Structure formats: C-alpha cells, structure tokens
C-alpha cells in the first residue's frame, strides 16, 4: 500500500510545483547564495570597526531599474550597499497583469530581474517576484471586498529565490503598501531576523486596500522598529509600533556636482517632480498666468490639453533630472491634499531637494513649511498666481535654505541603527 502523504509533504510539493512553474516562465536564476563571491566584482567598501556587516532584504513595490524614478527606499538601499552591507532589493506588487498597465516596466523587470536577482552594484542586487497574477489595491469596493482574501493568499507565498535570501537575512525591511501582505511569511521564514517597517505614506492617502490597512494595524507592534520621515505621520499610525522619526535625505554628492544647464539661455523655468497627489489644475493655472515661464513636469501624468509652456517629461531616471533642479528658477510642490495629508510637508522628498538646491518653492497654504524659501498659495481659488510667481522669480537663492537637511548616507546609518536597537 502506498504511504499516506502528510500535510507538510503536500505543502512542499505545492511549492515545488510553483517554483518549477516560475522557473519555466523566466530565464534561469543566478545560483549565488549569501557569501559567494561575484565574478569581477569591485572591492567591497570597508566597514567601520564598530559596525557589523548585515545581510539586508528590502520588500517594496518600487523597481530598481535604470530610467525610472528613485524613491527614498532606493537611496537607502544604495547607501547600505556602499557602507559594506549585503543588500537584496525585492520588488513585489507586479505580475503579468503589469503588462496591461505598464508594458515597458514589465519588460524591463522581465529582462534581468524576473524571479531572480541581478547585480546592480557592489553589494546590491535587485530582483522581482513576477507571478502570473498579483493582488492590488483598487477604488472599486467589490474588488476591495475580494482583496480581503486575495492579498492574504498573495502574501502567503514567495518563490524559492526570495525565500532563500529572506531565510538568511539579518534584517528584512517592508515598505508601506503591498509588502505588508508578506509580513507573516517573512516571520515564518526567518523568525530571528530583525524586521523594519519603512513607512513613507499614510495607507489611506495612497488608496491602499482596506486589508493592507488591517494588516498594518494588527502587525505594527510586531516590527522591531517603524521608521517614518515625519512626526505627523508617526502620530497618525496605529498604536503599538516602536516609531522612530528619521527625516528624508538628499544625494549631496550628486547635487554638489556642477552640471551644465539643460534650459535654453535667457528662459525662466519652474520645475515639478513626482506624482504624489499631483494637482494638475494648479500647475495649469500657474502656466496660464505666466506664459513667459516654462513649467517642466517630471513624474506626473497629465490628462488632456496642456498650456504651450508646460513640458511633460513623464518618468525619468533621477540622475537626468538633477541638472533641471540645479538650474531652475523655482520649484513647485503642487499637492492636492487634505488636512490628513499635511504630513507630506514633513516627509516630502521634493521639498528637501528643492531646498538643497536653494530654490524658492511654490506650495499650498495648507502645508506648514517653515523654511524661508516657501511661498504659499491658496489651495482652492488662488486669485494672484502672477504675483506668487513673480515673488518666486525675485527671491534670491540662498545656501541657508539647505540648513539641517541630512544626506542619504546619514539617513541610512540612522535607519539601520533604529532597526538594531536593543529590544
């Protein structure tokens, strides 16, 4: 008589089948495990004697791809690698469904990172979990009802290439959003690893599914640390987390490098970067009020007709945007926000970058911005756009605007220290 198959054996066989399916869908995975040398790799940065080399895994919906925008999690990952830690950047929240929404992104991920890790730089490798389907947040209430099951099912499994590195990690970082669905799986795979909740946004502000908000409320106390860039954001999170406030940083070396201006000589230029809560109507109103100023919009989608002095670039790699920031006449932070989203003022990456470049900034009056380079406009019904723009054009640049802004190297060190504080 054939031996009975136990439940654990069934789980192993189910996972083996899925792993085989994933390997068929993609190119062969790189076989390197923790500690194995990479061919032709650069000399690794030396750690301070007081520091310990950590094996770090980052779960995020962001992709580490050339030509795409960088968020704070990219800078943190890069600087941890530069500091000598071994970093694996794992993209989740994508699948074959991504073909329908963002074909170029899916193709870029599939080329080198589909269900395997690809070397980005010394100590830094990036990979993407790309199953046939994935759970995603939606404004549709019927889909959100189904998401209560779909997200938990999606988060209950990770392919072999991801399981291996999580099982051997010293620290696993989960960014706010879809990565929360995998928290239970992370703890199961490696209960001894430190866990860090890298919270950059209020989940309801970014339209996260209710089930993700429930997971956050339930599990926040199980994370070893919760890092936020804003005291206001920390105060709005569910109770029970070990919250540490660490502000956003800037890539000082990149911004301090002199680069030629991309603008035509004699022109006046304003810049807007990012797509978070983008207020297209306000930018259009500015452009209409100041036809002699060119408005350069990076990262945000534009719907319908645009004034002729608005230039839409779409999503670009961060390095290519820096010269536009360095040589702009002023920056714009066109947030369409509510009282519950004011925390964005403290956590805004673009405000730090504008200020580091010494730019005057046009921003909504709802934002409590304390630096001297802020020029507030009425979020609803601004009647003096030309006067606001003229004030920005007349303001002198000043290095004082950058006082107190941290570098990403400092932010990375403080974040790692927070994750390994004694419990």
Image (tube, grey):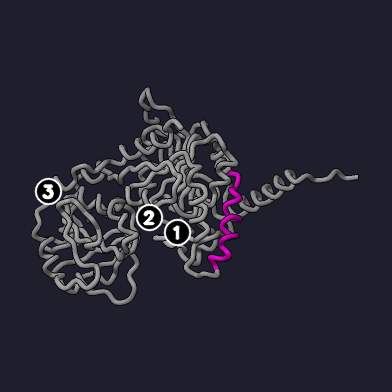
User: Do residues under tags 2 and 1 come within 8 Å of each other at their CB atoms?
Assistant: yes
Q: Nearer the viewer, residue 248 or 242?
A: 242
- Residue positioned most to the right: 1
Where residue 50 appears, as percent x and y from the top left, is 37, 24
Quadrant holding the N terminus: top right
Residue 114 seen in this snapshot: no
Q: Which comes before the other along the chain, label 2 or label 1?
A: 2
Q: What stretch is highlighted in magenta?
A: 143-162
Reading the image, the residue beneath label 1 is 105
Q: Give the crowd class for mark 2: few <14, some 14-19, many >=20 residues within 10 Å.
A: some
Which residue corresponds to the image point at 58% horizontal and 48% vertical from the top-left? 158
**Residue 68: mark:** 2
What percent of the width, then of the height, locates residue 244?
Answer: 37, 41
Q: What element carries label 1?
A: helix
Q: Is residue 150 magenta?
A: yes
- Mark 3: few, some, or many residues within 10 Å (few <14, many ≥20)? some
Q: Is residue 310 above or below residue 402?
A: below
| Relative side of 63 to 309, left or right | right
State the image coordinates of residue 344 (x, y, percent, origin top left): 31, 55
Q: Report helix, strand or loop for mark 3.
A: loop
Q: Mark 3 points at which residue?
A: 398
Mark 2–mark 1 distance (CA, rounded to whole Å): 9 Å
């Amino acid at each position: 008589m054939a031996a009975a198959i136990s439940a654990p054996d069934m789980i192993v066989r189910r996972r083996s089948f899925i792993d085989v399916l994933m390997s068929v869908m993609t190119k062969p995975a790189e076989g390197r495990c923790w500690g194995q040398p990479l061919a032709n790799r650069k000399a690794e940065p030396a750690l301070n004697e007081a520091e310990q080399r950590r094996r770090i895994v980052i779960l995020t919906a962001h992709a580490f791809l050339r030509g795409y925008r960088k968020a704070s999690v990219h800078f943190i990952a890069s600087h941890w690698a530069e500091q000598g830690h071994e970093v694996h950047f794992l993209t989740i929240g994508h699948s074959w469904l991504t073909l329908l929404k963002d074909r170029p992104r899916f193709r870029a991920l599939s080329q080198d990172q589909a269900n395997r890790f690809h070397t980005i730089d010394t100590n830094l490798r990036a990979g993407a979990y790309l199953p046939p389907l994935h759970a995603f947040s939606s404004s549709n209430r019927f889909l959100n009802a189904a998401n209560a099951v779909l997200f938990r099912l999606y988060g209950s499994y990770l392919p072999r290439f991801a399981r291996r590195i999580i099982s051997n990690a010293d620290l696993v970082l989960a960014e706010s959003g879809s990565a929360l669905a995998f928290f239970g799986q992370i703890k199961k795979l490696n209960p001894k690893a430190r866990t860090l909740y890298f919270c950059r946004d209020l989940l309801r502000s970014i339209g996260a599914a209710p089930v993700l908000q429930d997971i956050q409320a339930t599990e926040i106390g199980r994370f070893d640390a919760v890092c936020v860039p804003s005291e206001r954001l920390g105060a709005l999170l569910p109770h029970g987390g070990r919250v540490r406030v660490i502000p956003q940083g800037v890539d000082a070396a990149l911004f301090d490098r002199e680069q030629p201006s991309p603008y035509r000589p004699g022109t006046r230029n304003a810049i807007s970067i990012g797509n978070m809560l983008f207020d297209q109507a306000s930018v259009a109103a500015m452009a209409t009020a100041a036809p002699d100023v060119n408005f350069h919009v990076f990262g945000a989608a534009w719907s319908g007709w645009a004034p002729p002095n608005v230039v839409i670039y779409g999503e670009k790699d961060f390095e290519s945007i820096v010269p536009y920031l360095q040589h702009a006449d002023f920056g714009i932070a066109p947030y369409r926000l509510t009282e519950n989203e004011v925390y964005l003022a403290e956590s805004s990456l673009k405000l730090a970058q504008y200020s580091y470049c010494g730019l005057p900034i046009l921003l909504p009056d709802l934002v409590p911005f304390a630096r001297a380079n802020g020029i507030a406009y009425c979020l609803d019904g601004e009647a003096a756009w030309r006067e606001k723009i003229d004030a920005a054009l007349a303001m002198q640049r000043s290095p004082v605007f950058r006082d107190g802004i941290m570098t990403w190297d400092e932010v990375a060190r403080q974040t790692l220290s927070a994750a390994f504080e004694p419990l």
